[in-house]
Amino acid sequence: MSEKYGVVFVLGGPGAGKGTQCVRIEKEFGFLHLSAGDLLREERQKKDSKIGNEIEMHIRNGTIVPVEITCSLLHRAMKESSNQNFLIDGFPRNKDNLDGWNREMSALTEIKRVLFFNCSDSVCIQRCLNRGKTSGRSDDNEESLKKRINTYRESTLPVIEHYCNLELVSEIQADKTQEDVWAEVKGIFEKICS
Ligand code: C5P
Ligand code: MG
């Protein structure tokens, strides 16, 4: 078998800056950025998708799509690329995601690091509401955001805790400006790649 895929998971609340920083990481360090949310939104748009409605329901409610769907989208994107290293943004978001990943993907991948973008709720909400003015996203509104933050607290923080116990987490103070956050992220990634 060929070498395992290298994976860095990127976690944090809605609006913590995961996607923004992932774009910069991809450019500078060559890890391919795969956003679980983007893959789900793309799948939802497909005309012949039988699961489009189910995905939209979860996105609007800020709840988490069953792992069988999300993991297979991620795995397909990994296989279709010629990359060996991936930044997986917004996954695993809950215990179902984590268990499903471990079942399906642990033999194929090595988790190199988990980046945790730690950001206050007020900054997260403000950023998402600003983004909502132009993003067209059905979940960048106050009602969905409350639910997304709840899901993050109840379901995602325990996953981060799990990886903390495995000493895999690098925590980033994500309340700062994009440039200041980048300085921190870059330093962490230089170590990952050394
Ligand atoms: O990460 P992002 O903010 O783009 O995620 C948007 C929504 O996509 C989440 O609130 C959730 O409904 C869905 N999602 C999911 N499972 C993931 C990632 C995202 O269900 N692992
Ligand atoms: Mg994102």
Image (cartoon, rainbow, N blue to C red):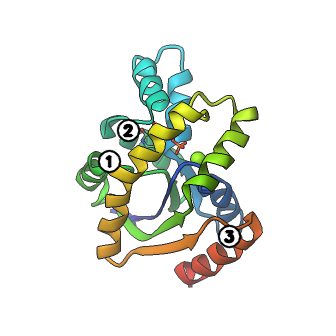
Work out how far the residue at label 2 is from the one at label 3, CA to CA, in angstroms: 27 Å
Mark 2, residue position: 64
| Label 3 secondary element | helix
| Quarter of the image where the C terminus is located | bottom right
Q: Is mark 3 within 8 Å of ligand 2?
A: no
Q: Can you see residue 184?
A: yes
Mark 1, residue position: 97
Q: Nearer the viewer, mark 3 or mark 1?
A: 3
Q: Is residue 160 left or right of residue 24?
A: left
Residue 98 in picture, x, y percent from top left: 30, 53
Picture residue at 44% right of the left edge, 18% below the top: 53
Mark 3, residue position: 181
**Amino acid type, callout 1:** Asn
| Quarter of the image where the N terminus is located | bottom left
Picture residue at 34% right of the left edge, 50% below the top: 154
Compared to 168, does 153 lie above or below? Answer: above
Picture residue at 50% right of the left edge, 73% below the top: 171
**Amino acid type, callout 2:** Ile
Compared to 153, does 181 lie above or below? Answer: below
Q: Check if mark 1's residue and mark 2's residue have beta carbons within 8 Å.
A: yes
The answer to which quarter of the image holds residue 160 is bottom left
Reading the chain from its start, which is encountered first: label 2 or label 3? 2
Work out how far the residue at label 3 is from the one at label 1, CA to CA, in angstroms: 27 Å
